[in-house]
């Protein structure tokens, strides 16, 4: 299948009309099923860096909103934070994958994540006809945080204590797409850097979302040379015990099932490097990544 050029719509002459029609018909029951539901999308990886992938992702998100799905976008931006810090003469240090965050670094994070990164996403969605609004966890008391358990080492890194959904609900009901930078604060007014995956999970649970979709650089859960289309909790436990799921994938898998336990309908892990993977995962029978479900039917 040919890939779209950046910003270009596929011409109907490049594929048989019957095939195009079949794709649209296949999407119809999913559009009907998900109209009025909420999808939380965690946006990260190459899909945030490559110009063409950013463009097509914005198109995909806009289309989801246009067919009646409430879309809540939570984004990362670690590379941009590191580049800004370097320009200001600050070194970035990481402990177990988390950025050590002192007062100078949290200012950089606010400036970069809640500023340029967030607004670039909002602008791109707007260019494709979507109506997006930049939000941080500080707005309308949306993300309340507590210090991370290793705060002595990590500094101003926080865990989500509470998600207040009022502002997010208001934006969704107005037909807008909240684009959320994962920054939170505590009752003393301290501001915290929060892991985007954790923030997305907590937001999805609080909103009772139909889906939480992780857009990353991982194709899905690999077993040998194939990608699992679906995995349930019991299978995941067996694969972890056998060492088939290992390393950094273990906390991702455990987090996914904790989110399911919190009441979210399904979790999806898809490859943001694949053009239109978001639409293909949601609106086709086969999908392109791995979906996590509580148990097999």
Image: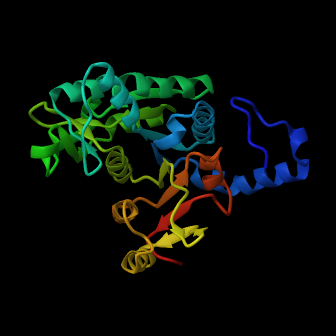
Compared with 126, 263 (above or below) is below
Q: Position of residue 149 (x, y in %)?
A: 14, 52
Name the residue located 54 percent from the left edge and 40 percent from the top edge: 47
* Visual colour scheme: rainbow
Q: Residue at x 13, y 32 (%)?
A: 190
Residue 61, percent from left and from top = 57, 38
**Image quadrant in which you'd find residue 158:** top left
x%, y% of residue 103?
Answer: 16, 28
- Tell me where residue 194 sits by quadrant: top left
Q: Which of 169 and 56 lies nearest the eye of the viewer?
A: 56
Snapshot quadrant of residue 242: bottom left
**Furthest residue toward top:** 88
Q: Is residue 150 left or right of residue 194?
A: left
Q: How many marks?
A: 0
Q: Residue at x 44, y 27 (%)?
A: 133
Residue 173 percent location from the top left of the image: 46, 36
- Please tell me which residue lies in front, 278 or 228: 228
In the picture, measured across the screen, residue 238 lies left or right of residue 101, that is right
The residue that appears at 61% across and 31% down in the rendered structure is 55
Looking at the picture, tell me which residue is in the foreground, 179 or 68: 179
Give above or below for 151 relative to 231. above
Answer with left or right where residue 233 lies relative to residue 288: left
């Amino acid at each position: 299948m040919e890939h779209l050029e950046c910003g270009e719509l596929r011409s109907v002459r490049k594929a048989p009309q019957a095939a195009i029609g079949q794709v649209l018909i296949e999407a119809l029951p999913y559009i009907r099923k998900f109209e009025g539901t909420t999808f939380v999308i965690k946006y990260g990886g190459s899909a945030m860096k490559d110009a063409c992938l950013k463009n097509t992702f914005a198109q995909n998100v806009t289309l989801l909103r246009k067919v009646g799905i409430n879309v809540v976008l939570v984004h990362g931006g670690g590379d941009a934070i590191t580049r800004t810090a370097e320009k200001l003469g600050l070194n970035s240090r990481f402990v177990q994958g988390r950025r050590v965050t002192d007062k100078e670094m949290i200012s950089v994070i606010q400036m970069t994540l809640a500023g340029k990164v967030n607004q670039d996403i909002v602008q791109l969605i707007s260019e494709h006809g979507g109506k997006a609004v930049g939000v941080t966890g500080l707005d309308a008391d949306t993300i309340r945080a507590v210090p991370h358990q290793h705060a002595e080492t990590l500094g101003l890194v926080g865990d989500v204590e509470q998600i207040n959904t009022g502002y997010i609900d208001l934006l969704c009901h107005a037909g807008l797409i909240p684009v959320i930078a994962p920054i939170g604060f505590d009752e003393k007014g301290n501001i915290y850097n929060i892991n985007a995956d954790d923030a997305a999970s907590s937001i999805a649970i609080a909103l009772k979302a139909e889906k939480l979709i992780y857009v990353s650089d991982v194709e899905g859960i690999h077993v040998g040379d194939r990608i699992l289309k679906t995995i349930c909790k019991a299978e995941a436990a067996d694969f972890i015990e056998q060492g088939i799921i290992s390393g950094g994938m273990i906390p991702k898998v455990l987090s996914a099932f904790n989110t399911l336990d919190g009441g979210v309908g399904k979790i999806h892990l898809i490859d943001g490097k694949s053009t239109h993977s978001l639409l293909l995962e949601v609106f086709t029978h086969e999908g392109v990544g791995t979906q996590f479900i509580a148990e097999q039917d």
